[in-house]
Image: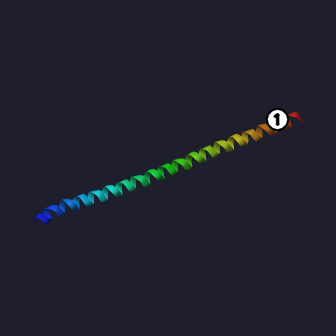
Amino acid sequence: MLHKKVAVPRLVFSLSVELAARLVVELAVELVFSLLVELVFSVSVELAAVELVFSLSVELVLELVFSRQ
């Protein structure tokens, strides 16, 4: 009887540890994924801003060059 009394709490503890480990891994994966999505979005916004500035700069230079002629 003593064996069963010890085995059940150990089983519960073991399952709890396994569940906690799975939860930590799942949360870590979710965090890394959301950070990657945020990074990709941030980089794409920055690239769009650089492209806009470059486009406006080229347009301004062309306008200055052709307005002097």
The image quarter containing residue 45 is top right
Q: In this view of the protein, which residue sits in the foreground, 40 or 18? A: 18
Q: How many marks?
A: 1
Q: In this view, does 32 lie to the left or right of 24?
A: right
Q: What percent of the width, then of the height, locates residue 50?
A: 67, 43
The image quarter containing residue 48 is top right
Q: Residue at x 73, y 39 (%)?
A: 56
Q: Residue at x 14, y 65 (%)?
A: 4
Q: What percent of the width, then of the height, locates residue 9?
A: 19, 59
Q: Which amino acid does label 1 sit on?
A: Leu
At mark 1, the secondary structure is helix
Q: Which residue is drawn at 51% across and 51% down?
A: 36
The image quarter containing residue 21 is bottom left
Q: In this view, does 38 lie to the left or right of 46?
A: left
Are there few (<14), some (14-19), or many (20+) residues within 10 Å of tag 1? Answer: few
Q: What percent of the width, then of the height, locates residue 43?
A: 59, 47
Q: In this view of the protein, which residue sits in the foreground, 58 or 11? A: 11
In the displayed structure, 54 sits above or below 10; it is: above
Q: Name the residue under label 1.
A: 64
Q: Split into 4 quadrants, where in the image is the C terminus?
A: top right
